[in-house]
Image: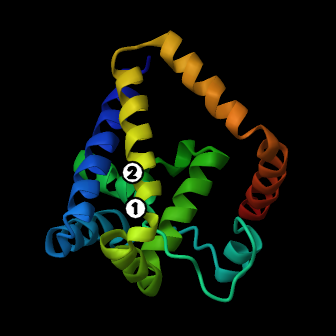
Amino acid sequence: MNPYAQEQISAYAKSESELFKMMIQEDETSFRKRIYEAKDFVFHGQKNLILFDDTIMKEFSIGEQQEHRKSNSHLSLLAMVDAWHVLKINPYDNLVGQTPPFRLRLGIVEYLFKNEELLEDTIHAALYDKSIRGDDLEFHTAVREWAAIIKYKDMDGYKTHFNETKEFFTDLLEHGRLQSAELIKKLSL
C-alpha cells in the first residue's frame, strides 16, 4: 500500500523486463552499456562499502560447493541496480535507516558489481547461456505477476501468491532463517 514502494516496484519490473528483452535478443552493446551505467551511478566513489569477501560468500552459498561456479545471469540483482539508477536512488544514502535484510541485499549486489570477473561472467551468461534462460523466463513472469498485484492493490492475489511461495519454500525456511541470521551477525561485527 506504500505509494513509494509501488513506484519502485514498477521501476524494478520495467528494468527487469527491458534487461530480459536485451538478453533474449543478445543485444550485448545495449545490455553492457546499461549495466555499466547503473554500476557507475550506484558504486562510483563509494567509501562505505559492505565488501563481502570470497570466504563469506563461499560459506553462505546455496547448493553443493563446486570448483567452478554455475553460470547465472543474476537478473534479479542486475535489475535492482538498474532500477536504482533509473530512479536516481543511491542505496548508500539510505544506510542510516538500514535493516539487516537491506544490508544483506546491498552486500550481495555490491559483491557482484565490484568483482569485475564475476560481473563479466554474469553479463556473458545473461546474454548467451541458454541453459539458464528457462529460469530467467520464470523469474521474469513472477516479477510481472507481483508487480501487477501490487499495482492494482490486489490483496487476495497478494495473499494467494504469498502463501503459494511460502509453501514452495517450506522445507528450506528454517535452514534459510539460520543461515540469514548467521550472515547478518557477521555483518554486524
Find residue 141 and report its horizontal and vertical position in percent.
39, 40
Residue 73 location, quadrant: bottom left
Residue 14 location, quadrant: top left
Compared across the picture, whether 175 is left or right of 80 comes to right
Find residue 108 and report its horizontal and vertical position in percent.
56, 64
Image point (29%, 55%), residue name: 20
Tell me if label 1 and label 2 are in contact, CB under 8 Å: yes
Q: Secondary structure at mark 2?
A: helix
Nearest the viewer among 66 and 96 is 66
Q: Tell me the crowding category of disc 1: few under 14, some 14 to 19, or many 20 or more residues within 10 angstroms, Cα based.
A: some
Find residue 104 and report its horizontal and vertical position in percent.
62, 56
Q: Which residue is mark 1?
A: 133
Image point (35%, 35%), residue name: 144
Label annotation for residue 86:
none
| 55 over 162 or under it: above or below | below
Name the colouring of the figure. rainbow
| 181 over 121 or under it: above or below | above
Image point (61%, 87%), residue name: 68
* Residue 124 can be seen in this image: yes
* Residue 47 can be seen in this image: no
Three-letter amino acid code at the position of disc 2: Leu
Q: Where is the C terminus found, in terms of image quarters?
A: bottom right
Q: Tell me the crowding category of disc 2: few under 14, some 14 to 19, or many 20 or more residues within 10 angstroms, Cα based.
A: few
Three-letter amino acid code at the position of disc 1: Arg
Q: Which residue is mark 2?
A: 137
Q: Where is the N terminus found, in terms of image quarters?
A: top left
Q: Calculate the distance from the C-alpha at mark 1 to the C-alpha at mark 2.
A: 6 Å
